[in-house]
Amino acid sequence: MTQLITTELVELDRNLGNDPEAVIRHLASKVAATGRATEVEGLFADAYAREQKTATGIPGGIAIPHCRSAAVVEPTLAMARLSPKVDFGAKDGPADLVFFIAAPDGADQAHLKLLSKLARSLIKKDFTAALRNASSEAEIVELVDGALADKPAAHAAAPAETVAAGAAASSVPAGSATASADSTARTRRLVAVTACPTGIAHTYMAADSLVAAAQEMGVDLQVETQGSSGAKPLDPAVIAAADAVIFAVDVDVRGKERFAGKPVINAPVKRGIDEPAKMVQEALAAADNPNARRVPHFGAEEQAENEATEKGEHIGQKLKKALLTGVSYMIPFVAGGGLLIALGFLLAGFDIALGTKANDILANNTLFNLPDGNLALYLGTVFFKIGALSMGFLVPALAGYIAYAIADRPGIAPGFVAGAVAGFMGAGFLGGIVGGLLAGYIAHLIGTWQVARWLRGLMPVVIIPLLASIVASGLMFLFLGGPIAGITLALNSWLSGMTGASAIVLGIILGLMMCFDLGGPVNKVAYAFAVAGLGAGSATNQAPWQIMATVMAAGMVPPLAMALATVLDKKLFSLAERENGKAAWLLGASFISEGAIPFAAADPLRVIPASMLGGALTGALTMAFNVTSQAPHGGIFVFFAIGNVLMFIVSIIAGTVVSALAVVALKRWAVKKTVDTVEPVPVTV
């Protein structure tokens, strides 16, 4: 096994910068300089992205930035003793001891256990004091090697991945038949699970901190660490005897159903390091409170926990989260289907979309019986049909995953069915949104029913999908589908009535709609309007093709503009946004407006108005220049289907530049006023 740390990986009493970004970059460069990583930037980006998810500073003047990265060749530790200190987000102030843990994506278990052991050692005051007093790099390496080789303290860890304290660490084992009745009566028992996204440092440090706090309070606490080096599940008997459970996690708990019915305290993993005593006290209080939140009986009541976790969110935030979830799962159908349709047009011609031509070719021909010996026609038809079928899932997928965001897995089937009903009734995207919300909330409501134990297993796989599908789809058929279809038709008729002399005004309106919510319902109404009329276009009636070109060009502007803005002034954007900006070039060129969503979610009052300004300009220009598109998707990659392609590109560039300059100007001069509020903890989809 290679040595994890060497003297070349140690910096003593150096000024490495004023912020975590500079320190992490410097340590990443040291790792790469020793040949343990293939590149600096890739390693730095992975480590800093992890830092932005959860600050790695912990009490005691310590920080442990860490990551798994494809750039890492072998597991490595780099250490810096900083002068001056740098703030890594710990509550008690900046850090002077920084350990950078770099693990390969496929690190072996032995190395991961050593890295985890080091993280645990850093909460020991004698170890950190020795690090601060070390006079040379060699002494630091010797101290670290000693920490990795020595057995951990009694309260810090056991050889297995389950950690115990209190009665379990005393001379009389918890649950022992020899323990006195009086001792058993006084002992409070808790169980906990700790887990972080990387599973190397915070997972184990939180476990040790909780164990140490519980031991001081005379509480029997046993912890299951769900980390990278594996996990040994808690004994079911230990869970059954526990008064309450603590989840100190940043990711989903594996096997959460084992704790069903137990009072629960749920918090980010870092709180287990910063405030372990408070979490133990809260768990004890929850155990004594008959109304305390409990781990739900899975899946029938799974949403009860989500509701409690999101208690502080108002209805608008919950709806937005559900809609964005639906859109995010819908994007692959749009991107893949649209590009396949464009490729089909390239090979088979645009008339493949007319009437039943595609179906007839596929029904009467095979690869070994080509239509008139035309391989391109047959393959183009295959690509077109696959793309069309993919696009046919847009509304059901949108509705299904909106319902999933509200009711978790039991909501998926009712949502898909309600979305299919919306498509059948002509209610389009608006119907899909309404159907998904209905299915999700109905499934969530049914999931809160108290049912007999023998029926709980059937709830998520049979009862909830069946009843929610009947109710949500029934409401769509009987009451809602028709009116929503009427609204969609009225919108389409209103937009169609603005063609001709008002073409430029129509272009501005479509541009504004495409950029207003970046893939949301308003955007989709404009897109659906364009796609629905595409088949009516012809050499003598190019208005539907002009509308399609306008919608596509305007929809490309927001992601391209955000990508350009991150180049024009990098300092105005976070590292994560700059990384998103690189991807936004391709997403924008492909006509995936959702590529701008990360920017809009972080700063909607600047990004959305700037995007709408450029989108309106692009929409007006494409209409003014009579640009046409016979492809419903694909962006610049379907240039062969664009009429007047040069002006199509000019219009997009003009809108992109205007939006990019606008967002840069707004970020520079339209500054938010600072208020004394606590930032909400971000939630991951």
Image: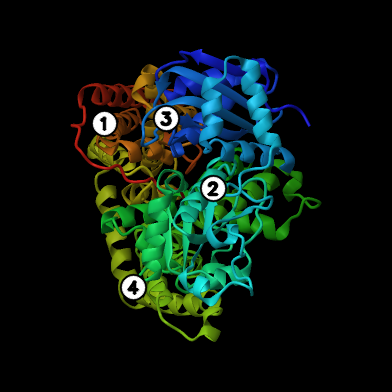
Q: Distance from label 3 to label 2 (Cα)?
A: 21 Å
Labels 1, 3: front one:
3
Find residue 429 and report its horizontal and vertical position in percent.
38, 57
Q: Look at label 1 and name its amino acid.
A: Leu
In the picture, the quarter occupied by the N terminus is top right
Q: Residues within 10 Å of mark 2 (few under 14, many from 20)?
A: many
For label 2, the SS is helix
Q: Nearer the viewer, residue 510 or 628?
A: 510
Q: Distance from label 4 to label 1 (Cα)?
A: 52 Å
Residue 291 numbered tag: 4
Residue 613 numbered tag: 1
Q: Look at label 3 and name its amino acid.
A: Phe
Find residue 481 and report its horizontal and vertical position in percent.
34, 70
Q: Look at label 2 and name its amino acid.
A: Asp
Q: Residue furthest right?
A: 368
Q: Are marks 1 and 3 in contact (CB under 8 Å)?
A: no
Look at the picture and state if 251 lies above or below 64.
Answer: below
Q: Distance from label 3 to label 4 (Cα)?
A: 37 Å
Q: Distance from label 2 to label 1 (Cα)?
A: 53 Å
Find residue 138 and report its horizontal and vertical position in percent.
66, 17
Q: Residue at x 63, y 47 (%)?
A: 383
Residue annotated with mark 3: 88
Q: Look at label 4 and name its amino acid.
A: Asn
Residue 426 in sight from this viewpoint: no
Quadrant of res 454: bottom right
Q: Residue at x 68, y 17 (%)?
A: 34
Q: Earlier in the sequence, mark 1 or mark 3?
A: 3
Residue annotated with mark 2: 208
Labels 3, 2: front one:
2
